[in-house]
Each structure stands twice: as C-alpha cells, then as structure tokens.
Image (cartoon, rainbow, N blue to C red):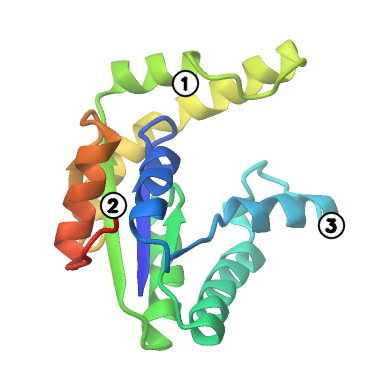
Amino acid sequence: MIVWVNGAFGSGKTTLVEELRPRWPEALVYDPELVGYALREIVEVPTGDFQDLRLWRRQVAGLAIGLVEEYRRPLLVPMTLVDPAYVGEIFDALRDAALDIHHFFLKVPRDVLEQRIDGRVLVPGDPEREAKVRRWCKDRIAPCEAAADSLPGDTEFLDGRLPPQELAEQVLTRLGVTPRS
C-alpha cells in the first residue's frame, strides 16, 4: 500500500507523515525529493524542477514499487505532485504494479501557506538562497490550488489547518489502520 500525502509547500505533508510514523511503525517513509536531489548531482535540470525530468518520475515510481515488493510494508510518501500528467505517469506505474494507492491532499488557504513558508528556515546560513527558495515555494501555491480539480477522482481532501494529531487520526481511520499508542 502507498499513502501519498500531497499538497502545497507548507501544507503539512512532512508533519503529517511524522505524526503517522509512530502510530503506524510498520510503514516506511519514502521521500521522493531525495531522488531529485541525487539526480541534481548527476544531471542538469534545465527547468530547475526535478519533477520535469522523466527519469525522476520513473525512478520515483520504480523505487516505490521496489520498496513495497522487497519489504512488504506500506509506504508513506510526503510529496507535492500536482502536474496532472506527472500524477498520471507515476500513479499509473504504481497501479500497473498492482499497488494500492491512497492519495490524500492537504488543502490550506494561501495566506496560511505563506505564513508557514515565511516561518521556516529553508537554507540555514545562506540568506540569498533562502529568499530564492522561499519565492520558489510561494510561486508554486497557485498551481497547487488549481490542481485540486485535476487530481485523481479518488483523492481524499483534508483540511491542512487541523492539528497533525487529528489529521493522522483521519488518515488512519480512512485506511482502516489501528494506530499504536
């Protein structure tokens, strides 16, 4: 089983997965950003967004499939993924491998997202790069908001303003998983 936690930067994806992890210890956490970071060290990313690399999308799906097949454990995947073609490409590969996908999208109003992004330290010790990354995150809010209508029909929308504990309970209930205390 794959539990994909989606949403804009600052929506609480990583925080939710961190809240789920101790309640569901058999689940593995798989962050596709690590695949992107590795690819950036190897090849040029002309657009600046590693999701635009076909190889990133193939590797993300392939590694997810491999992790589930090899370890027979569910995956928690915190990753913003809103381009309809990219969602289709990755999710189709996962479905073709007969994996059960549960897709959650954290909806958060723009002003709250901007506050959260401004409240984070993204690149410690490098104010210039920090400002650039912050702008990049904020520039992605509108596409994330617009994507809600084009996400797969079985996407479950959650109110990302809720406390992480409450969101974790909602996710585990919808998955039918009995949490550990």
Q: Is residue 117 left or right of residue 162?
A: right
Q: What residue type is labelled 3?
A: Ile
Mark 3 and 1 residues: CB-CB less than 8 Å, in contact? Answer: no
Q: Is residue 172 left or right of residue 60?
A: left
Q: In which quarter of the image is the N terminus?
A: bottom left
Q: How far apart are marks 3 and 1 (CA)?
A: 28 Å
Q: In which quarter of the image is residue 62?
A: bottom right
Q: Quadrant of residue 121?
A: top right
Q: Determine which of the numbered discs, if any, sits on residue 74 in the image.
A: none
Q: Name the residue under label 1.
A: 117
Q: How far apart are marks 3 and 2 (CA)?
A: 42 Å
Query: Mark 3 packing: few (<14 Cα in 10 Å), some, or many (20+)?
Result: few
Q: What residue type is labelled 2?
A: Ser
Mark whose residue sits in front, 3 or 2 = 2
First of labels 3, 2 by sequence position: 3
Mark whose residue sits in front, 3 or 1 = 1
Going 19% across and 39% down the picture, which residue do you hit?
A: 166
Q: What residue type is labelled 1?
A: Ile
Element type at marker 2? loop
Residue 153 in view of the camera: no
First of labels 3, 1 by sequence position: 3
On screen, residue 17 above or below 56: above
On screen, residue 179 above or below 123: below
Q: Name the residue under label 2.
A: 181
The x, y position of residue 73, in whole percent, is: 44, 76
Mark whose residue sits in front, 2 or 1 = 2
Of residues 50 and 46, the one nearer the viewer is 50
Q: Determine which of the numbered discs, if any, sits on residue 42 in the image.
A: 3
Q: In which quarter of the image is residue 25?
A: bottom left
Query: Mark 1 packing: few (<14 Cα in 10 Å), some, or many (20+)?
Result: some
The x, y position of residue 75, in whole percent, is: 44, 67
